[in-house]
Amino acid sequence: MKVALIGAGMRGNVYAEYIHESKDSSVIAVVDIDKEKRDIAAKKYNIPSEFVFENVEDFFALGKVADAVIISTMDKDHFVETMRAISLGYDILLEKPISPDPKECLLIQQEAHKYNVKIIVCHVLRYTKFFSAIKEIIDSGELGKVVTVQHAENVGNFHMAHSFVRGNWRNSKLSSPIIMQKSCHDMDILVWLIGSNAKKISSFGTLKYFTKENAPKGSADRCVNCPVSDTCRFDGRKAYLPIKGDWPATVLTSDQTEEGIMKALAEGPYGRCVFKCDNDVCDNQVTTIEFENGVTATFHLSGLTNKMHRTIKVMCENGDIYGDDATEEITVTKYSSNSFYEGETRTFKVVSEEGFHGGGDYRLTMDFMNIYKNNEESKSSIDKSIESHIMAYAAEQSRLRGQVITIDDIKEELLNS
């Protein structure tokens, strides 16, 4: 299997490395507007200079030169690049979101069917052992049917500051709302676990903390010359220097020396004061969902948490499942008859594979290669993945409009717009 990498940032390289390391597949071309990223990828994957491109149209002008493409560029670029790849007959591993515009998502789905190409969306949570274990318990029926679910994405205050205040996804006009970019994962996992599409959605959220009003008195626009940096936990030196060589410090610059990081903090976007950026996405959002099968769920996104992790509680007819993907512990409880008896409980630890997202990235990439070779259906195909994007869009529209959104109505609105 020959694959071209469009977008040589961290996420695209995760998938490309797994493909490169496999026995019968290879990365044969790279496209990126950043010369440094292009050069690093070209060297890593042994790509000849004639297949290294700054402009994606120059790559597409060659026609179909590979079996598939990885598209891992900025959200707003996905539509044009994906539609062009579809027209050439490429199978596609597409980073989420499919597009920040849900109508474009629907158009991509239609074109994929028209040209009979496979699009696998990078909903990696479906591939983790943690969520797969919860899915197996639900599907076993030992606790009866699912009644309601509480799910939370704890973004982590440092991750919020890095990606959604200073970083690429800070502004919905430049990328997409946070619930689309970050939490289409979570909408997708709820659809998968509950086994039903959504019917109605309501949502509330704000940008509460990372605003100019909360800037410390006397603070500067940049960390490197800020007189109050010693008392600020978001000081870029505290955020990145102790973890140089690891994510997210590696996003700042390929020069992971102290000098390289300090230069990036002085000149680049990640050295800006988190209270004085051009961010507009929510740092907290609560969403309530009614599914077509009658199950209800709440989803709570917060950028004000200490660590990055997801927690979930699935309440069924005869018991519940509680899990925390940080500890990788899952507790299954069968309901008791009275308050003196705790009920039958078992707790077990899921042992994930190494790598990002508890091995989910690796298993997703293997699935992508497998469906190409064996013509099988993926668990994160475009048809299965698109529902989460409609849900995320509906949640954002509910937040902005201040009303409950019916999914069928929003789909009709999109198709007729």
Image: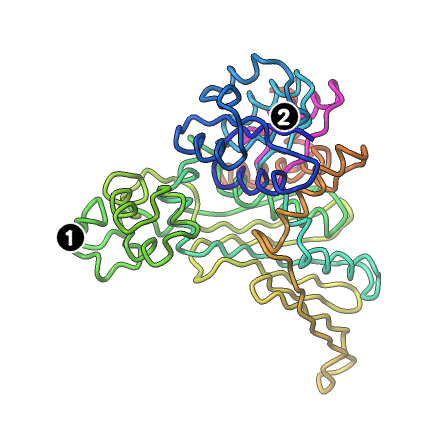
Q: Which quadrant would the C terminus be assigned to in this image?
A: top right
Is 106 within the magenta?
Answer: yes
Q: Element under label 2? A: helix
Identify the residue at image location x=52%, y=27%: 30
For label 1, count other residues whose C-alpha is less than 10 Å away and answer few (under 14), some (14-19) or many (20+). few
Q: Quadrant of the N terminus?
A: top right
Marker disc for residue 11: none
Q: Amino acid at mark 1?
A: Gly
Where residue 340 appears, as percent x and y from the top left, is 72, 87
Could you tell me the amino acid type at mark 2?
Glu
Q: Residue at x 50, y 31 (%)?
A: 7
Foreground mark, 1 or 2?
Answer: 1
Residue under pointer 2:
413
Residue for point 34% across, 55% down: 239
Quarter holding residue 376: top right
* Range shown magenta: 97-122
Dividing the picture into quarters, in which one does residue 300 lie?
bottom right
Report if the CB atoms under discs 1 and 2 are less than 8 Å apart. no
Q: Pinpoint residue 350: horizontal percent, then vertical percent.
A: 67, 65
On the image, numbered disc 1 is attached to which residue? 218
* 107 displayed left or right of 219: right
Give neighbour class at mark 2: few <14, some 14-19, many 20+ (Cα, 10 Å): few
Up-down relation of residue 73 to residue 115 (above or below): below
Residue 308 is left or right of residue 372, and the answer is left
Asked which secondary structure carries label 1, the reply is loop
- Which percent across, then down, holds residue 398? 55, 40
Q: Nearer the viewer, residue 139 or 77?
A: 77
First in sequence, mark 1 or 2: give its number.
1
Marks 1 and 2, Cα distance to the nearest angstrom?
Answer: 48 Å
Q: Is residue 109 above or below residue 272?
A: above
